[in-house]
Image: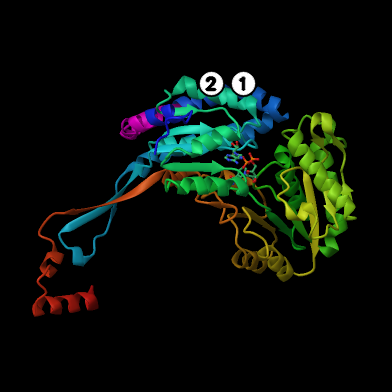
């Protein structure tokens, strides 16, 4: 198949030619690259990163430091600590039947990789996978989201300064650029975005049987029972829901609360919102904005739909289109067919559902697609165990939310509709590697006794082998 007309063929081809040189880079060389990236992010470009993300959706600097810069620096530090052992050949036992040989496997780079990233944590979700790809010895083409152009420019400057195009290249562009890239025969595609586009990516990957990591989204539930310290649970829930203006893949999308606690729960949320963002979040320096008018209008349409279904706006509901502002909003009495209960919200609107017993919650969750995250707040071990073992989700956190993302020892990713494959730390390194198995024959192998012709004696040995080995 000819790719000559593809606008990105040249850069792809240059990486393909260079992939073995990059793959052979020693542990030290890989660490040097990670150090250079770390230095660029936390020193040379730190202010530019903060300013760019503020220009893209008014994200407060402290939030950028915490949720964009810190996770990538953490990824790099973790990789630096462990890369030597990850890169080592992994010896495994050899069974007696294969006497005279030894076995191991190595993590070899996948080759030429594509990273397509979303806009909601534009630096974190672009450079996080890049750290794993570099650690594993790959060449990479990156396509960040067109919706956050300011930070894409800064990331482009960083990549151009640190890498030649035949090792890591960043392509700014919209869906068309993404589509053109997806035509090329990459060895691995790491995509973060919506399940709808995830399906497009997987279809394109199947043309070349490229392996994929799909970090997708969905509706992540939180459950709060009546054994918990409600004030503390609400503080954590409100942070997890409204940080980044609710535009977080693992934010609690909606919450189940014991019916008897509904009123006091809403009162606590109101108090907590005032503490975080004052009585008018529009004037708060700690509250970001919706990324653009398209997503603003999408969310406003969900609110209008809720009102037309006679739902109750318990808190918030105010909007300002000029500034893509939507107040922190809490909605109850939503019918199941409302958009807020059907679509991933990805914004600062929290639907509340009341429940009487935990079984109905479990049944409800299991009628939906497997969520990316599921949160349970309870002091009751039996309830926690019951929820975890009777539901399915990519990731869970007990008595908190979102923070599980920052533990590099944990695999991160969804399941089926919310994702395929895992990222972070060792799991990210694995994702960008092929586990190549190697067996070495040292002496005359035991199986050779069984080569044809199959005599009666050999048949007896086969019988013994089947029985005992
Ligand atoms: P999106 O799927 O619209 O876009 C993601 C990327 O895909 C962008 O770079 C975009 O240019 C590209 N793209 C869009 N349409 C395409 C098409 N038809 N063909 C090829 N490429 C295309 O997602 P988004 O709006 O940027 O991000 C929000 C979604 O991402 C939410 O569903 C959220 O839950 C999910 N998300 C998941 C994670 C995770 O780690 N699991 C993290 C962040 C966001």
Foreground pick, 266 / 111? 111
Quarter holding residue 31? top left
Dominant SS type (magenta)? helix
Proximity of marks 1 and 2: CB atoms separated by less than 8 Å: yes
- Residue 119 shown left or right of residue 81 in the figure: right
In this view, 312 is above or below 41: below
Task: Name the side, left or right, on which 254 lies relative to 27.
Answer: right
Magenta part of the chain: 15-35
Residue in the picture at 23% in, 78% down: 467
Q: Position of residue 461 (x, y in %)?
A: 14, 76
Q: Give the quarter of the figure containing the N terminus.
A: top left
Residue indicated by mark 2:
157
Q: Position of residue 84 (x, y in %)?
A: 35, 39
Measured along the vertical axis of the image, is residue 99 above or below residue 214?
A: below
Kindly identify the residue that appears in the image at 48 percent across and 42 percent down: 189
Q: Regarding ligand 1, which quadrant of the image does it lie in? A: top right
Foreground label between 1 and 2: 2
From the image, tell me which residue sits under label 1. Answer: 48
Disc 1 secondary structure class = helix
Image vertical order of residue 417 relative to residue 179, above or below: below
- Would you say residue 22 is visible in this rendering? no
Q: Position of residue 303 (x, y in %)?
A: 84, 47
In percent of width and height, residue 139 lies at 41, 33
* Quarter the C terminus occupies: bottom left
- The secondary structure type at the circle numbered 2 is helix
Label 1 and label 2: CA atoms lie apart by: 10 Å
Q: Residue at x 37, y 47 (%)?
A: 434
């Amino acid at each position: 198949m000819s790719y000559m007309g593809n606008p990105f063929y040249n850069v792809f081809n240059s990486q393909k030619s260079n992939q073995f040189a990059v793959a052979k880079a020693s542990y030290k060389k890989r660490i040097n690259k990670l150090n250079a990236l770390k230095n660029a992010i936390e020193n040379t470009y730190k202010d530019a990163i903060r300013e760019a993300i503020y220009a893209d959706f008014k994200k407060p600097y402290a939030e950028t430091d915490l949720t964009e810069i810190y996770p990538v620096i953490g990824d790099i530090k973790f990789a630096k600590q462990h890369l030597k052992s990850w890169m080592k050949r992994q010896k495994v036992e050899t069974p007696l039947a294969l006497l005279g040989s030894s076995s191991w496997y190595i993590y070899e780079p996948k080759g030429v990789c594509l990273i397509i990233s979303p806009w909601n944590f534009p630096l974190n979700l672009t450079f996080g996978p890049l750290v794993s790809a570099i650690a594993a010895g790959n060449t990479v083409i990156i396509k960040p989201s067109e919706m956050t152009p300011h930070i894409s420019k800064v990331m482009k400057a960083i990549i151009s300064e640190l890498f030649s195009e035949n090792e890591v290249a960043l392509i700014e562009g919209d869906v068309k650029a993404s589509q053109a890239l997806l035509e090329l025969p990459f060895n691995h595609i790491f995509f973060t975005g919506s399940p709808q586009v995830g399906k497009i990516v997987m279809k394109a990957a199947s043309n070349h049987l490229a392996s994929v990591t799909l970090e997708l989204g969905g509706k992540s539930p939180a459950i709060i029972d009546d054994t918990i310290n409600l004030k503390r649970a609400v503080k954590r829930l409100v942070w997890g829901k409204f940080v980044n203006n609710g535009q977080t893949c693992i934010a609690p999308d909606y919450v189940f609360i014991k019916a008897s606690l509904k009123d006091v729960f809403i009162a606590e949320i109101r108090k907590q919102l005032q503490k975080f963002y004052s009585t008018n979040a529009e004037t708060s320096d700690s509250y970001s904005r919706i990324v653009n008018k398209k997503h603003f209008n999408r969310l406003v349409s969900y609110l209008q739909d809720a009102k037309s279904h006679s739902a109750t706006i318990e808190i918030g509901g105010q909007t300002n289109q000029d500034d893509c502002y939507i107040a922190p909003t809490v909605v109850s009495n939503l019918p199941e067919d409302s958009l807020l209960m059907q679509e991933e919200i990805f914004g600062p609107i929290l639907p509340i559902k009341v429940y009487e017993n935990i079984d109905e919650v479990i049944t409800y969750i299991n009628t939906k697609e497997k969520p990316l995250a599921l949160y349970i707040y309870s002091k009751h071990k039996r309830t926690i165990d019951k929820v975890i073992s009777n539901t399915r989700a990519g990731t869970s956190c007990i008595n908190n939310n979102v923070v599980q993302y920052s533990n590099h020892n944990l695999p991160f990713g969804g399941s089926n509709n919310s994702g395929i494959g895992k990222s972070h730390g060792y799991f990210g390194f694995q994702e960008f590697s092929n586990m190549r198995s190697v067996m070495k024959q040292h002496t005359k192998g035991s199986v050779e006794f069984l080569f044809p012709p199959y005599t009666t004696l050999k048949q007896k040995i086969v019988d013994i082998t089947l029985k005992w080995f």
